[in-house]
Structures are given as structure tokens and as C-alpha cells.
Amino acid sequence: MSRFLLRRLGWMILTIWVVYTVSFFLMRVVPGGPFDSEKVVAEAIKRNIEARYQLDRPLVEQYFTHLWHTVQLDFGPSYKLEDYTVNEVLAQGFPISASLGIFAMVFAITLGVTAGLVSAVARDSFYDFSFMVMATLGIAVPNFVLASLAIVLLVFNWQIFPAAGWGELRQVVLPALCLGAPFAGYIARLTRTGMLEVLGLDYIRTAYAKGLSHQRVVLRHGLRGALLPVVSYLGPATAGILTGSLVLEQIFALPGMGSHFIEAATQRDYTLAMGVVLVYTFLLFVMNTLVDISYGVIDPRVEVE
Amino acid sequence: MNATTRRIFPYLMLLLILTALGWAVSFGTLPKADFTFNNGTEIKTVDPAKATGSPEGRIINALFEGLLRNLPEKEATDPHQVIPLEPTTGGVAESYQVSADGTVYTFQLRSSARWSNGDPMTAHDFVWSWQRMLHPETGSEYSYQLHYVVNAKKYNMAEVQVGDRVEIELKDRRDPLQAFPRGTLKRGLLKAIEKPKGSSPDDAEEADSREEWIYRVEVKPTSNGKVSWDAAGTLKTFSQQPTGTTVDHSCHHVLIDFDSNVEIRAINDQTLVIKLNNPTPYFKQLLAFYPLYPVNRECVEKYGAPNWTKPENIVTNGPYRLEFRRIRDRLRLTRNPHYWDVKNVSLETIDALAITSYTTSLNMYINGQLDWSPTMPNTIMDLLRKRDDFVSAPFMAIYFYRINVERPPLDKKLVRRALNLAINKQLICDQITAAGQQPARSFVPPQLQGYTGQQCGAHDVARARQLLAAAGYPNGKGFPKVQILYNTSDSHQEIAEFIQQEWKENLGIDIELRNLEWATFLDTLNQGDYSVSRSGWIGDYPDPNTFLDMFVTDGPNNQTNWSNSTYDELIEAAKSEPDSTRRMETLQQAEGILMSELPILPIYFYVSTNLVSPRVKGFSGNIQDVHPLHILRVE
Amino acid sequence: MDSSKQGNPVTPARSAGTALEDYAQLLEEAKSIQGVSLWKDAWKRLRRKRVAMLSLWFLVGLLVLAVLTPLLPLQSPIRQDAQRRKFESPNLSAVSLLGEKFKAQLKELQDRQATVKGDLRDELDEQIANLQSHEYQVNVLWHQPGFLTRGFIGIRMAIFGDWAIPSICGTDNLGRDVLSRVCWGARVSLVVGVVATLVSLLIGVSYGATAGYFGGWVDNIMMRIVDVIYSVPFIFVVIFLITILSEDSIKNSLESYGINQIMIFYIVIGAIYWLTMARVVRGQVISLKNEQFIEAARTVGCSRRRIIFRHLIPNVMGIVIVYLTLTIPAVMRFEAFLSFLGLGVAPPDVSWGLLVNQGIKVITPLKIYWWLVMFSGATLAVTLFALNFLGDGLRDALDPRMKNR
């Protein structure tokens, strides 16, 4: 187990290092790039950058100095915002994105598993059909189209939710729903398939034969096996939620890391963009590792190596 | 993996998920403020000396306070009323007198005026703040507002002549990157300036070689902080070059001595005397305008820029303190208990949101999340105008396009005129902005008394094509691709797209669009890194000069690289002209030159549009669209 | 019995004749039996799935529509007329291609022409001639049409003249017809989808095939690289790349090499999706590698390169096609995503993502311009659906385990 974690850590460090190196060289070597000495930059920002990056030093020295800073989690000043460092922007944006992502994930899992379960148990019924149709809809329709439809219906027509911004719990609900919908759909499908497979297995028949109630069989014995594909899906689901949040934060005016990243992209704020990319890589790795560990714990057949 | 671990694992995961959920919930909540409004964008800074925009102005007006304060003449009972603003003694100054010839202003400051850390305010605060604002290294874009004061311009432009009393800042600053606190100051009489051999009297080159000049100064002795100008001094040489060369000391700046030359004097802690070059009728308005607001010396010197503006460090003297600032989200202001008039400030907390999308702003307003929205989408303006909570007033402001006249082919006057004539401004006002705006053919808006704006050509596509052909681009052939820059906002994009199409259809030229966030946009303009850019200007005071003196050569708000010496002379002459009719005529002449050369393309004159919730009291309209936050009440 | 056999389904009864006659009869029968290739088999299976076939026909229709768009009598996708045609809801009122705006412009000029003389008169004449010229009209009504497109447009104008389909999908905030924008947007979205997928195909297939064929440490390293890249949230890196490449100075230097923004787009998007393709192809190649026919080829003396490209890759095509149909929607979705955020296609070009973005921006509680979001959103959603269903159907159809069922 600890060996597994160590190896994972090793991979993560390698990956982050690769991303860092590629970005570093892209930003410095390309002519006319952000650190080009001839670049026209505002006075105050120029001062910040020169103080931090020592652009007159040889490239290799810069590389290692900046690497050292980055390892200490100091991402430097923002390239476009005079008053802020990248760390400050990330620190402000992260909690909002995290809360949005967590709500979306919880919603996706709860709704997805329940729908999949009901579908599997009430197979080929009306519920099954309608749930699966909704699941397919959720998966195929891009989340910003879904969000706009949701806004038209739920915010303006029926006025259930507020339009944008954050500050009250109500304001996170609609974005989380839109963000989690495609994943809920996928999880519902996976649960249904998994459930159907498991329910056909011998040990389930044994459980019924033993006289256990329907509920107990399904929930206590069947669910565990059915959840395996769902658990392994959580890794890509996190990646998807991180990506999806980019668009939804824009639509709902949530000042999270995703919207800062998009702003950094449109405003060409390179240091901020790089900082966000590194953070997201790290998050994804952590999530994937957690998922692999959980998988190994849940399924005794799997050796976590 | 033993069995017990496996058994408790799901519960562990459940616990983890619940904790995560709890944490997420805690971050999703923020206590609601008494009053929330949309400031339209993430502001660039709260430093009065560094800000230039009106979103910054709204915040600075709440955080800081100047000698005088712009307030509505009378109390508003209905937001639809248009009540002019007056620079009143509702600020730090309790009373003031103006000399008979209008050049000497004497202010008596309130003894109850305090900073937000409890320290009393004194006249010295103003002297120091204005010195900082005029100091060339601060790079204030509004420093020219103080040029009316005797010798202030010389200080600001770092002009020194032989025989002047000078102050020299040595290179021993506590932090070399911060202008304040300054290094050791030496004062003396400038005896000679040695310029490097072969330097021509050409202005541009001279400025470049300034670093190599050697100043011979007779340094006067100081005792107890007072300089003895009459005593004999010692001759020393100074230069901006590093030490170890041919000079005695290396210095950062050699400027005329502020204390003895610039006529901003603190007679005592409570009295401030200012002497102007000429009687300037709008000087009172300038004093109530935010670039001249004071900043706290200790705070700035201790933390340096920009850290002193952080909520945990900043010290302000206005009705509100800065509680926190969340990027691209909001700024929270809370009532300053040390404010001298705190009992008349009704709102405890105010949130200024930074929503750039007009539609989102409107949606949040209708949803009740905003009490005041100064922005709204143009597309449904006709619907909005019929609402009771829609407040509109004539606005002394112009929407125009700046042209960087150093970038070919925009350096040709004919091309700029062609571009101007090809735009159907009436259509923009009727169809795109749709709130009653007026197409603009002059630069100065029509609301000013005694002044008639000079006009450029009217919409005429045939003539535009003729001019473009005469400039060497018949039918637009060979015209290089030009980019229109604008700050992120729906209506700027619409107008830019429209003009893109107009120029394409009428002149046959290809245009690219580029948008930047507000702060970056301002910086880019400042750097001159654009070809054509959307701009707007709100008059700082009700006088044509606020519009016209932007475009003097190298004016910080010029940003077009346009320079015309006759124009400069006329503006300068107007400043010292005592007769108001003749003054207006001189300004009109200047505007005539501006409209003929067209370094800017006037598009339309604004109309202020606001959506104000009926529960807000104390709101009224005025031609500057300034709405002081501390006089608002909410029911 | 083998039901895919064409010809005689019944075992021939043993004739009482000689062995030679038996053999002759068998030979006859053998000739009449037609074998079935993988493709025919798959096609038959696919035809049975109604949803997949519906999707196929829909996509074919969409493709044809997209290719033929310049020929269709649609209105201009870029011409603005904020004065007269702003925010029209879907309607059937007659419209002209050149638009009321053009007619008004022409009339105004002609009125002036009558009253003016001399220099200005010449200028007006020139302007009127220009307005009526084909070249000007094409440039104003469509954005930088390429050579073939211009040809199509020419034919369209010759056949239909000034008539255009009315705004059955309404108009947007600047008076532009939504139907024509959706059609022209289809071209961009589909082209980006197809080209970027082809790029990913090229890279992915070669990479995967090489890794699978060589095996050993080469395979190990190559797959490790894929693993590392896979764990990076690639979309963010791509956006970061686009940020750097859109920097004005860099963009200009790239344009001087002939690479414009949209090409960078293709390459960069294609660069994300090759990973799955590479993995899948590698897996397939590894299982094929040990087949007899590869042994045979090697024995005969084929070079490695020939084996990879001539024998392995064609046999991998089945699974590649499945993944192709699953990658195209992912790419289109990503392009819509980027255009929605303002990082993709720039105005005056149109793409579905951009249309949805423009639609959302004007939704307010006071007035919901549903047609601005619905048509582009629905088209995008339905296309992605169709691609997904088709991909699922193809996957089932091409599944070798399902052969002859």
C-alpha cells in the first residue's frame, strides 16, 4: 500500500515536472513571448516581474530558481493584475470551485446511483425507460446548452433559483446541478449495467434462496459489486467536472478558479494560467489515487499495486 | 488489506464526503450586505493617485475624502430628480476663503477629521499626498490636475534650471523599488548642469540622455529639518549614474525643491494655503475630485505600493473602510467609525460587485440580488425605459474611439477623416444603445453653458471613400489590417462589430476585434500598444477644459501620440485668460483643431442609465452621474 | 447452419453417381456460395439497428447540407441590419438576399446622384457601380469565401437571384438570420470536427501501431509517455497553448508562415484526442501481432514498415472507425466549448458554440429570445446524439465476437 502511494507520488511529481518544464520553455523561448525583454508591459507589472524572475540571468539559472519557488508553492506575481500574486488569486478562487465541484459530484453520485438502481430493479419499465432517456440526454447535450435551458426555465420562467453570483447556498444549487448532470447520466448507466450483471450472479440467487428480503439483497449484497465501475469512473468524472466548471462558472458569474483560468487565457496572463494548470494537475492526480485506493479496498479481488 | 480496514472503509469515505460537503457549504455562504450594487468591473486600484476610471472613482469616493466633497445641492426625494452637484464643505475642510484675485485658497480643516486608524488628519497629510501625486516616479495620470498650482508643473515634469532651489534624492532608499519612503534628501542651489558631449537640444534625445547629466549643486546645511538657504553651502556633484564614476553621489531624482517652490503650504496643522498660477473657476471642483484625495503617509511608507492598498493594511479617511476585496467578485465596504460625520452615514456594509456582463447585472437586479445596477443590456432598452425604477439623466460624457496616430496608415489625416465619415452614428444611437443618446460630432458634450462645440464632418459615405482613395487606398485596396481594442462588455462588442461592418462595407477595409479586461485595457492604452481603441470620458468638472486638455502633447490622458503645438498653446492660453467669453472662444479654437485632425473619432454623447430599487433613498441624477454612497439609505 | 451463405441453403443429397460427379457438384455449389467480408457483415448488423441508421442518415444529410450550403438560397450569415431586422422571432415574411438595407443604400445614392455634379458625381457613380458589382456583394454577404465556395455562390446567385429563404429561425441582435448562421456554422463545426479527428487519427494510429508492433522497451516507453500525458488535464494545457499562440506577436509570425488561427486550432485539438486512439490501436496490434498471417508476411521477408502499414493497420481499421465516430463528437463538443468561452472561432466567422454563446448573453427575465439559443443548441445536441448513437451502433456491428450472428 505504501509502495503504491510512493509510486503514485513519483508519477505525479514526474508529470507536474513535465508540465512545468514545457510551459517554462514555451513562455521563454518563443519570440515575442511574455518574458521577452522587448515586450511592452505596464510599469508596475514590469517591476513585479523583474523583481521576481531575474530575467537577465542565464536561462538555466532561471529555470532552477523558478522551479525552487514553484516547489515551495510560490507561483509568482500575476502577469496582468498589478495588485495580486497568483497564489492570492488561487486562494480566493479555489474554495468556490471546490464547493461547486463537491456539490456537483455528490449530486451526480446520489442521483446517478439511485436512478441506475431503480432502473435495474424495475427493468424495462417506464421508470427504466425514462431514466435512461434522461441519462442519455444528460450525456450528449453539452453542459452549456443544458445550463442555458435550465436558466430559461428555472430562473426566468418559474423563478425558483437566483440568476448568478454566489453568497447564498441557493446560488450554488443550479450550477452544481448543471455541472453534475452529465456525470449523473453516465453513473446511472454504469450502475444499471453493473447492477444487472451482478443480479444475475450466483451469490445473489443464494441470498434470495436464503430468504433475505428484496431490499436487503439488492442494497447489501448487490450494490457493492455494481458500484465498482462507478468508483473507477470517478477519476475521469473529476476531470470532467474540473473542465465543465470552466464554462459554468462563466455562465453563473462564480469567481472560482475556472473562471480565473479562462480570464487568464483571454487576457494572456501566463503566470496565472500556468499556476492553475499545475493546481488542476495535482488535484486530478490526488483524485485518481483516491479512486484507485478505494477500488482496491472495495473489491477484494483487486490488488492495489 | 485486512478485513477490518475493508469494513470501516465505506464509513471512512462517507465521513470524508460529509466533511467535504460541510466545508463546501461553509464556503458557499457570505453574510449579505445592506446595499449591493454592480460596479461594472474589477477595479484597477484604490490608490487615488493611480486611478483614472469611474468604477475606481465610486470606491475611492467612499473610502477617501478630499478637502471638499461633491454633494447634491439639496436632498433628493425621488431618484428621477436631476440635482446638480456642488463642491461643498462636507469634506475635510470646514471652511475656506478665496482671495479677491482668485489665486489664493486658504482652507481650515476640521479638528474632528480622522484616519481610519484613529489618527487625526492634518494639513501636512495633504501636502505630502499632493507631493506624492506630483512626484514623477509615482506616474499619476491625473497629475496635471494640480498643474494649476504655482510651480507644481515644474516639479511634476522634473524640470530644473540653473539657479533653482533643488532637492536631490540619494540612492539610499530603504527599498529601491519603492518611491516612498524616499532616500536621504539633499537640498541646495543648482549651479550648473553638465550634459554629455554631443547631445543635441532636441527634446526627445535630451530626455534620454538625462540619466547622464551631472548636476553641480551647492548643498545647503540643514538643522532640525530646516534648510538654511542663506548659509554658505558645499559644492557637490550628483548624477543618476551609479556611484563610483565621476560624481560625488548617485541620486534617483533632481527636482525643484518642493517645500520652497511649490505653493502648497501647511501653515499649521489645521490650515492649508494653495496659490494658483491663474484664477481657475473650476478649481473647487478639482478639489472635490478623487485624484486630489489624501493618503496616509505612514501606511504608504510602511507597506509600499501596492501592498498598502490591501484590506489588512490600508488606512483611509472616508465614510467607509475596505473590509475585503475578492478578485472579479466583490469589494466590501464597512462604515468607518472614525469618520467625522459617521452619525449621518446610514449604510453599514456595502458590496460593490464586479460583473462585466450587462445581462447578468440586469438579471441579478430583477432577482433582487442587486439594489442598483448602472449597467443594463441595450437589447431591451426600450422595455427598460418604461419601468419606474429606470433612472436616466443627461450625462456630460462622450463615447469615442482613440486612434494611435503613430501607426500607419492611421498617421494620415485623410484616413482618419474617412474612417470618421464612414460611421453612421445615428444608427448606433437609435439601434444599438437605444437609450436616447445623441450622435457626437464634437468632442465637448452640449450641456456646458456658454460653449458651442466645434464639429467634425457628418456621416457621408461617398466623401469618406473619396478621402480614402485620396490617401492612397482606393476601395480599401492595400489597407493593412487594423485592430479595434475594447474592454470587455457586451455593448462595446456590439458597437465594435457594427463599426467593423460599416468600415468593411463602406470602405472595403478589414478590421479585427480584440477585447481586454478593464485593468489590462487601461494599461495597454497607456503603453500605446493599440491601433484603434474604444474609449470614454466623463467630465471631471463642468467646464470644456476637462475634455480638451486631455490632448495636449504628452498629456497622460492623451495616449494617442497626437501632438499639435498650436493646440497646446491655445489650451495654455485659455488657462490664464481671465475673461470668460474670450476663454471659451480660445477653447473653441482648440477644439476646431482637434476636430480637423481627428486623433479621436467622436461616436456619441452618453445618457446616464441606472436601475435603482425603490427601497433605496437619497439617490438622484446629475450630469456627472456621481452617486455618493454615504448619503444613501435603504428601507 | 451458416445463415450468411447466399445460394443454396440445403445440403445436397448424395447422388448415386461416381465420386467425380460428387466432386463436380460440390465444386458447383462452392462457386455459388458467396463469402462475406467483415464489412458486409457489419453493415447488415448495423442496418438492423434503427436508431443507428437514423443517425447515419441524419449525419449524411447534415454533411450534404453543410457542403452545399453556399448553393442554398440562404440569407447572408454576416450582414447586419440592426435598424430593420433586430430580434425578429421566427417568421415567414419574404426577404431579399441583398436586404432592405442594400436597397435603401442604393436608393439614397441614386437620389443624391441626381442632384450632384462634377467630382462628387463621379465618386457617387463609382460607388453605385461598386455596390452593384458581384464582387462587392459576395464580399459583403459572406466572409472571405474560398475559391470553391465562391463558385457555388456564383451559381446560387445565378439560379435564385435575390430570393432567399425567409427567417424561419428568426434574427439575432444585429439583424442577422439565424438559419443561415446555423448552416454556415455547421460547416465550421463539422470541418473542425473532421479535420481535428483526422489529425488525431494520423498521430494515434501510427503511434499505437508502432508501439504495439515493436513491443519490449520501445512499447514500454511509448506507453509510459502516453500515461504521463493522459494524467495531465490536457484541456487546460491546450487552452494554455492557445493562450500563448494567440499572443499578437507570435500570431503574426505564424501567419507569415501561412498558419492561421484556425489551423493551429485543428492541430492543437487533434493533439488531445490521439491518446485514446493510440492505446486502442496498440491493444489491437498486440493481439494481431501473433496471428498467422503476420508470421507468414514476416517469413516471406516483408520489411517491418510494410508489415505495419500494409498488414496491421488495415486490420485495425474496424476499431479505428468506431473510435473515429466517437472522437468526432468529443472534438466538436470541445470546439463548441472553446468558442463559447471566446477562445475559439472569432467573429465574423460563425460556429455553433459561438451561436449558443451569443444566444445566452441576451437572455433576460423580461424577454427571452428563445430562438437564439434553441436552434443552435438543438442542432448541436442532435448532431452529438447522432454521432454517439452511430458510434455505439458501429461498435456493436463491428464487434468480431458478434460475427455471423
Image (cartoon, coloured by chain):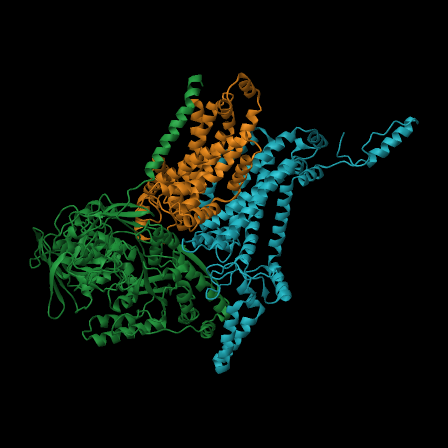
**Percent x, y for residue B322?**
24, 47
The answer to whether residue B299 is left or right of residue C82 is left
> A191 above or below B193?
above
Vertical placement of residue C206 versus A3, above or below: below
Point out residue C401 in the picture as x, y percentages from the top left corner.
66, 31
Q: Which chain is cyan?
A: C
Query: Who is closer to the viewer here, B103 or B340?
Result: B340
Q: Looking at the image, which residue is at 54% across and 21% down?
A: A204
Rendered colour, chain B: green
- Quadrant of the frame with the N terminus of chain C: top right
Q: Nearer the viewer, residue B191 or B320?
A: B320
Residue A267 lies left or right of residue B589; in this view the side is right
Res B50 seen here:
no
Q: Position of residue C278 (x, y in %)?
A: 57, 36
Q: Which chain is orange?
A: A
- Quadrant assignment, res A126: top right
Name the residue located 52 percent from the left edge and 68 percent from the top edge.
Answer: C100
